Amino acid sequence: MSIYPWGRYRAKGMIFWKLIMIKLISKVKSETLADLRSFCRETTSLMTSDVSNYAKGRYRLWLFHECNLSNGKITKSYHNDRLWNFCQRVYPGTNIGLLTFGGNINGIHSKGLIKEHRDHGYSRAIARTVNLGSCIFNYDGKDYQLNDGDIIEFNCKKLHGVTKILSEERFSINLWQLNQEKGYFPIV
Ligand SMILES: [Fe+2]
Protein backbone atom coordinates (compact mmCIF):
# COMPACT_ATOMS: atom_id res chain seq x y z
CA MET A 1 0.00 0.00 0.00
CA SER A 2 1.44 3.36 -0.87
CA ILE A 3 0.90 5.95 1.78
CA TYR A 4 1.65 9.60 1.23
CA PRO A 5 1.49 12.37 3.80
CA TRP A 6 -0.48 15.55 3.59
CA GLY A 7 -0.61 17.50 0.39
CA ARG A 8 -0.09 21.22 0.63
CA TYR A 9 -2.35 23.61 -1.20
CA ARG A 10 -2.40 27.36 -1.44
CA ALA A 11 -5.63 29.24 -2.06
CA LYS A 12 -6.40 32.97 -1.94
CA GLY A 13 -3.32 33.69 0.12
CA MET A 14 -4.28 31.17 2.76
CA ILE A 15 -2.32 27.99 3.27
CA PHE A 16 -4.31 24.93 4.19
CA TRP A 17 -3.62 21.26 4.34
CA LYS A 18 -5.62 18.66 2.53
CA LEU A 19 -5.35 14.90 2.83
CA ILE A 20 -4.89 13.67 -0.73
CA MET A 21 -4.03 10.07 0.08
CA ILE A 22 -4.86 7.85 2.99
CA LYS A 23 -2.17 7.86 5.61
CA LEU A 24 -1.08 4.83 7.62
CA ILE A 25 -0.52 6.48 10.97
CA SER A 26 0.07 3.49 13.24
CA LYS A 27 -0.51 -0.20 13.93
CA VAL A 28 -2.41 -1.71 16.84
CA LYS A 29 0.14 -3.28 19.22
CA SER A 30 0.24 -7.06 18.94
CA GLU A 31 -0.66 -7.51 22.63
CA THR A 32 -3.76 -5.33 22.16
CA LEU A 33 -4.86 -6.93 18.90
CA ALA A 34 -6.17 -10.22 20.35
CA ASP A 35 -8.14 -8.41 23.09
CA LEU A 36 -9.58 -5.93 20.64
CA ARG A 37 -10.65 -8.72 18.29
CA SER A 38 -12.41 -10.64 21.05
CA PHE A 39 -14.14 -7.44 22.17
CA CYS A 40 -15.34 -6.88 18.59
CA ARG A 41 -16.55 -10.49 18.31
CA GLU A 42 -18.52 -10.25 21.56
CA THR A 43 -20.01 -6.94 20.53
CA THR A 44 -21.56 -8.38 17.36
CA SER A 45 -24.54 -9.32 19.59
CA LEU A 46 -25.26 -5.58 20.05
CA MET A 47 -24.92 -4.70 16.37
CA THR A 48 -27.86 -3.89 14.15
CA SER A 49 -28.29 -3.84 10.41
CA ASP A 50 -27.21 -0.58 8.79
CA VAL A 51 -29.97 1.73 7.57
CA SER A 52 -27.73 3.32 4.96
CA ASN A 53 -28.46 2.40 1.33
CA TYR A 54 -24.70 2.44 0.79
CA ALA A 55 -24.12 -0.33 3.33
CA LYS A 56 -26.94 -2.82 2.81
CA GLY A 57 -26.43 -6.04 4.78
CA ARG A 58 -23.73 -4.52 7.00
CA TYR A 59 -24.00 -4.83 10.79
CA ARG A 60 -22.70 -2.02 12.91
CA LEU A 61 -22.76 -0.37 16.33
CA TRP A 62 -22.53 3.36 17.00
CA LEU A 63 -19.92 4.24 19.60
CA PHE A 64 -20.26 7.04 22.18
CA HIS A 65 -22.81 8.98 20.13
CA GLU A 66 -25.14 8.16 17.28
CA CYS A 67 -26.28 10.46 14.51
CA ASN A 68 -29.70 9.84 13.03
CA LEU A 69 -28.82 10.23 9.36
CA SER A 70 -32.32 11.33 8.35
CA ASN A 71 -32.80 14.19 10.84
CA GLY A 72 -29.24 14.83 12.08
CA LYS A 73 -30.20 14.29 15.74
CA ILE A 74 -27.33 13.25 18.03
CA THR A 75 -28.08 10.80 20.82
CA LYS A 76 -25.92 8.84 23.27
CA SER A 77 -24.76 5.43 22.20
CA TYR A 78 -22.63 2.50 23.32
CA HIS A 79 -19.85 3.41 25.73
CA ASN A 80 -17.29 1.51 27.72
CA ASP A 81 -14.32 3.07 29.45
CA ARG A 82 -11.67 0.76 28.06
CA LEU A 83 -12.83 1.28 24.50
CA TRP A 84 -13.07 5.05 25.09
CA ASN A 85 -9.48 5.18 26.37
CA PHE A 86 -8.22 3.12 23.44
CA CYS A 87 -10.06 5.37 20.96
CA GLN A 88 -8.67 8.54 22.60
CA ARG A 89 -5.16 7.19 22.06
CA VAL A 90 -5.97 6.41 18.42
CA TYR A 91 -7.68 9.75 17.77
CA PRO A 92 -7.51 12.33 20.56
CA GLY A 93 -10.81 14.20 20.83
CA THR A 94 -12.91 11.60 19.05
CA ASN A 95 -16.47 11.44 20.38
CA ILE A 96 -18.42 9.48 17.78
CA GLY A 97 -17.56 6.19 16.11
CA LEU A 98 -18.91 3.20 14.27
CA LEU A 99 -17.87 -0.39 14.79
CA THR A 100 -18.61 -2.39 11.67
CA PHE A 101 -18.33 -6.05 10.91
CA GLY A 102 -18.00 -8.32 7.88
CA GLY A 103 -18.22 -12.11 8.23
CA ASN A 104 -20.25 -14.74 10.11
CA ILE A 105 -20.43 -14.75 13.91
CA ASN A 106 -23.12 -16.18 16.24
CA GLY A 107 -25.59 -16.63 13.40
CA ILE A 108 -25.12 -13.06 12.17
CA HIS A 109 -24.04 -12.73 8.59
CA SER A 110 -22.76 -9.30 7.73
CA LYS A 111 -21.55 -8.28 4.29
CA GLY A 112 -19.48 -5.52 5.79
CA LEU A 113 -19.14 -3.57 2.55
CA ILE A 114 -20.00 0.04 1.89
CA LYS A 115 -20.25 1.72 -1.50
CA GLU A 116 -18.25 4.85 -2.20
CA HIS A 117 -19.75 7.78 -0.30
CA ARG A 118 -18.84 10.95 1.58
CA ASP A 119 -19.50 11.07 5.32
CA HIS A 120 -22.43 13.05 6.72
CA GLY A 121 -22.04 16.57 8.12
CA TYR A 122 -22.04 15.34 11.74
CA SER A 123 -18.32 14.72 11.42
CA ARG A 124 -15.33 16.92 10.84
CA ALA A 125 -13.28 16.06 7.76
CA ILE A 126 -10.60 13.91 9.33
CA ALA A 127 -11.54 10.33 10.15
CA ARG A 128 -9.38 7.56 11.54
CA THR A 129 -10.06 3.86 11.11
CA VAL A 130 -8.73 0.89 13.04
CA ASN A 131 -8.81 -2.09 10.69
CA LEU A 132 -8.96 -5.70 11.94
CA GLY A 133 -8.69 -8.31 9.21
CA SER A 134 -7.97 -7.22 5.66
CA CYS A 135 -9.97 -5.48 2.99
CA ILE A 136 -9.81 -3.27 -0.07
CA PHE A 137 -10.53 0.34 0.80
CA ASN A 138 -11.23 2.64 -2.10
CA TYR A 139 -10.35 6.28 -1.48
CA ASP A 140 -10.64 9.04 -4.04
CA GLY A 141 -10.77 6.52 -6.88
CA LYS A 142 -7.79 4.41 -5.79
CA ASP A 143 -7.69 1.00 -4.13
CA TYR A 144 -5.67 0.40 -0.97
CA GLN A 145 -5.25 -2.89 0.86
CA LEU A 146 -5.74 -2.48 4.60
CA ASN A 147 -4.07 -5.14 6.73
CA ASP A 148 -4.68 -6.47 10.21
CA GLY A 149 -4.06 -3.81 12.85
CA ASP A 150 -3.64 -0.89 10.44
CA ILE A 151 -4.72 2.50 11.71
CA ILE A 152 -5.35 4.95 8.90
CA GLU A 153 -6.34 8.57 8.59
CA PHE A 154 -8.24 10.03 5.65
CA ASN A 155 -10.49 12.88 4.60
CA CYS A 156 -14.00 11.41 4.94
CA LYS A 157 -15.54 14.15 2.78
CA LYS A 158 -13.78 12.59 -0.20
CA LEU A 159 -15.34 9.52 -1.82
CA HIS A 160 -14.43 6.34 0.02
CA GLY A 161 -15.79 2.83 0.51
CA VAL A 162 -14.97 -0.76 1.37
CA THR A 163 -15.27 -2.77 -1.82
CA LYS A 164 -13.92 -6.19 -0.84
CA ILE A 165 -13.19 -8.14 2.32
CA LEU A 166 -10.14 -10.38 2.02
CA SER A 167 -10.18 -12.12 5.43
CA GLU A 168 -12.81 -14.44 6.93
CA GLU A 169 -13.77 -11.71 9.38
CA ARG A 170 -13.15 -8.03 9.27
CA PHE A 171 -13.94 -5.30 11.79
CA SER A 172 -13.45 -1.60 11.54
CA ILE A 173 -13.61 1.03 14.24
CA ASN A 174 -14.27 4.30 12.47
CA LEU A 175 -13.67 7.39 14.55
CA TRP A 176 -14.67 11.00 14.05
CA GLN A 177 -15.01 14.26 15.93
CA LEU A 178 -18.50 15.76 16.01
CA ASN A 179 -18.64 18.88 13.86
CA GLN A 180 -19.66 21.44 16.48
CA GLU A 181 -19.09 24.27 13.96
CA LYS A 182 -22.07 22.82 12.09
CA GLY A 183 -24.19 22.37 15.21
CA TYR A 184 -23.48 18.73 16.06
CA PHE A 185 -22.74 18.84 19.77
CA PRO A 186 -21.82 16.02 22.14
CA ILE A 187 -24.35 15.27 24.87
CA VAL A 188 -22.73 15.91 28.23
FE1 LIG B 1 -17.62 6.71 5.46
Image: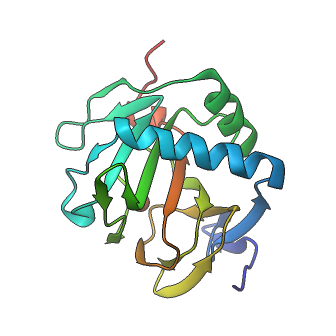
- Residue under the image location 60 percent in, 37 percent down: 94
Answer yes or no: is residue 72 visible: yes
Q: How is the image coloured?
A: rainbow
Above or below 36: residue 161: below
- Rendered location of residue 68, percent (x, y): 25, 37
- Rendered location of residue 153, percent (x, y): 64, 61
Answer yes or no: is residue 122 visible: no
Is residue 32 found left or right of 118 in the rendered image?
Answer: right
Q: Quadrant of the N terminus?
A: bottom right
Above or below 38: residue 117: below
Q: How many marks?
A: 0
Q: Nearer the viewer, residue 180 or 12?
A: 180
- Rendered location of residue 120, percent (x, y): 34, 51
Above or below 104: residue 22: below
- Residue under the image location 63 percent in, 69 percent down: 19
- Rendered location of residue 125, percent (x, y): 52, 54
Q: Nearer the viewer, residue 57 or 177?
A: 57
Q: Nearer the viewer, residue 110 or 154?
A: 110
- Residue under the image location 19 percent in, 50 percent down: 51
Find the residue positioned furthest to the front. 106
Is residue 57 found left or right of 179 in the rendered image?
Answer: left
- Residue under the image location 52 percent in, 51 percent down: 174
Rendered-image quarter of ligand 1: bottom left
